[in-house]
Image: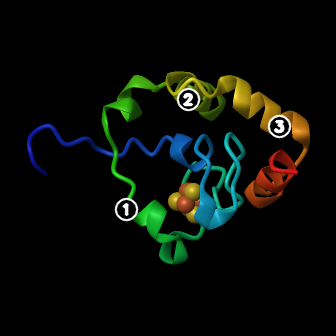
Amino acid sequence: MSAGAHECTRCGACCVAPDIAALDKPLGLVCPHLGPDALCTAYESRPEVCRSYAPDELCERIAAPTLEERVAKYLAHFQLTAEAVAVKASGLTSRAALFARRSA
Ligand code: SF4
């Protein structure tokens, strides 16, 4: 590892907080492949976007005892809290369906 590189803390937040097009996963919703131990249950077949995701200083900055808290800190960092609340309130679990509704 090079100096300044960051280790994955296995916190699970990057499998919940971001919008992931390759998985049709909306912002703030748990990836269906995330296991209860916050590890990927589809590790061998996970999409490229997950394979290439690199830990950075945010991983340490959002450290918290629960996955829910880590996700909340991640979303707040990118000022996406309100949008994630709106996604949850919509009841839609498909990113494509959310975008279709927004552009209708
Ligand atoms: S496929 Fe695996 S690594 Fe990718 S977001 Fe889902 S749980 Fe995380």
Q: Find residue 75 and report its horizontal and vertical position in percent.
A: 58, 29
Q: Find residue 2 and report its horizontal and vertical position in percent.
A: 9, 48
Decide: few, some or many residues near mark 1? Use Cα within 10 Å; few <14, some 14-19, many ≥20.
few
Check residue 88 in the rendering and tell me which mark sits there, or answer none: 3
The disc, 2 or 3, on the residue closer to the chain's N-terminal end is 2
Question: Please, what is the three-letter code of the amino acid marked with disc 1?
Answer: Ser
**Tag 1, which secondary structure?**
loop
Q: Name the one closer to the observer, 79 or 36.
A: 79
| Residue annotated with mark 2 | 70
Q: Name the one closer to the observer, 102 or 29.
A: 102
Question: Is label 2 or label 3 in front?
Answer: 3
Colour pattern:
rainbow
Are dots 2 and 3 in contact, CB under 8 Å?
no
The disc, 1 or 3, on the residue closer to the chain's N-terminal end is 1
Question: Please, what is the three-letter code of the amino acid marked with disc 3?
Answer: Lys
* Label 1 to label 3: alpha-carbon separation: 27 Å
Q: Residue at x 55, y 23 (%)?
A: 73
